[in-house]
Amino acid sequence: MIGDSGAIALAHVFGKLDGLKKISLSKNDIGDSGTAALAEMFEKLTGLQKINLGQNNISDEGAIALASALDSLIDLQEINLWNNNIGSYGATAIAESLSKLTNLTEIDLSDNNISDDGVIALARAFEKLPMLEKINLGYNGIETEGAVVLAAVLDEVTGLKEIDLSMNNIGLEGITAIQRLKENKYYLDINL
């Protein structure tokens, strides 16, 4: 595990690698200061296509720093932030930047602390992502309201192939709303 100090050191090196397409730093105990350093580096790597920072220690503060860098990553296709400590504030910040990432096909924010406010902000961003195919929001704090809003928005995301909302407390109304997506998207893989 490299922790924050290792992430800061790597950010200085990676920032000089113009052709870098993929960064995978999962399971490294990277916290907010390391994420902030990486975010500064990401702004220079405009051709970056995949970011994996899953299973770290990123909270809302780190997510907000990361969100500020996402605006410049117009080629980004996949972002994986699963199993961190990102809450609704961080998810909302990320959502504000996501809408500019029109090449994004996959987002994994599972196993965080995102509640309805965060998922509603994310839903509004998802409807602006024409290439989005896979969303994982399992193991969060999403309840009925968030699931219903998400379902309404995802009905308009034409390329969506997979959604995971497992281990949330979305209730019968939320389950029904999400299951209705299959009426227009018979090929959609839903995990509740």
Image (cartoon, rainbow, N blue to C red):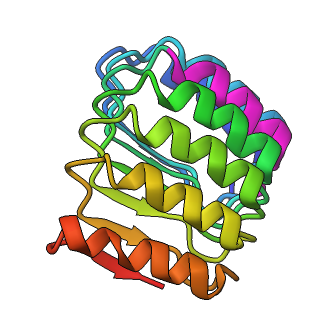
- Majority secondary structure of the magenta segment? helix
Q: Is residue 62 left or right of residue 10?
A: right
- Residue 62 % position (x, y): 77, 38
Give the percent coordinates (x, y) of residue 93: 70, 32
Foreground of the two, 91 or 38: 91
Quick one: 70 or 183, which is closer to the camera?
A: 183
Whether residue 13 is visible to the viewer of this picture, yes or no, is no
Compared with 116, 46 (above or below) is above
Figure quadrant of the N terminus: bottom right
Is any atom of residue 86 visible in this view?
yes
Q: Residue placed at 59% from the left, 80% from the top?
A: 173
Residue 18: horizontal and vertical position, in percent? 35, 14
Total marks in image: 0
Q: Which residues are magenta?
A: 57-71
Hey, which quadrant is residue 142 in on the image?
A: bottom right
What residue lies at 58% left-to-right and 67% top-to-bottom? 147
Is 26 positioned to the left or the right of 73 in the image? right
Location of residue 11 in the rendering, given as x and y in whole percent from the top left corner: 61, 26
* Residue at point 63%, 35% (across, down): 94
| In the image, farthest residue toward the left | 187
Q: Measured along the vertical axis of the image, is residue 112 above or below residue 125?
A: below
Q: Along the line of sight, which residue is nearer the eye, 33 or 149?
A: 149
Q: Residue at x 58, y 54 (%)?
A: 81
The image shows residue 86, relative to residue 4, as above or below, that is below
Q: Nearer the viewer, residue 108 or 174?
A: 174
